[in-house]
Amino acid sequence: MIGTEATILLVTSAEYLGGHTLLCTFNNGEKRKVDLSPLLELPAYKDLKEEAEFVRYGVDGTVFWANGADIAPEYLFEHGV
């Protein structure tokens, strides 16, 4: 595609909204509210069922947690409202 640059989707910030929900802001300016509770049955995310663990997240282009789990920005964008 001539003259078109692909933009890599990144999370620029995330705000805890309670439960297992984050409000993610992306580098395209959009914000999406994402409920991550459906992922908590998967082995990589099971430790995050405890709120005390879930809130120990950070942002570095995506959302990551203290236990080593992270999640693709595309997933957050596509599953957010």
Image (cartoon, grey):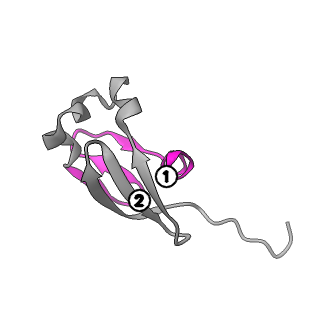
Label 2 and label 1: CA atoms lie apart by 9 Å
**Residue 36, quarter of the rendered image:** top left
Rendering coords of residue 6 (x, y %): 69, 65
What residue is shown with label 1? Answer: 73
Magenta-highlighted residues: 56-81
**Residue 13, quarter of the rendered image:** bottom left
Judging depth in this view, the residue of 80 and 42 nearest the camera is 80
From the viewer's perspective, is 28 left or right of 69?
A: right
Judging depth in this view, the residue of 5 and 16 nearest the camera is 16
What residue is shown with label 2? Answer: 24
Rendering coords of residue 16 (x, y %): 27, 55
Mark 1 neighbour class, 10 Å CA radius: few under 14, some 14 to 19, many 20 or more: some
Rendering coords of residue 80 (x, y %): 49, 50
Which residue lies at the image location 51% right of the left edge and 52% below the top edge? 81
Mark 2 neighbour class, 10 Å CA radius: few under 14, some 14 to 19, many 20 or more: many
Which residue lies at the image location 51% right of the left edge and 69% below the top edge? 27
Q: Which residue lies furthest to the bottom in this view?
A: 3
Quarter of the image where the N terminus is located:
bottom right
Which residue lies at the image location 33% right of the left edge and 47% below the top edge? 21
The mark lying in front, picked from 2 and 1, is 2
Asked if marks 2 and 1 touch (Cβ < 8 Å), the reply is yes
Name the kind of residue labelled 2 in the image: Cys
Lower sequence index among marks 2 and 1:
2
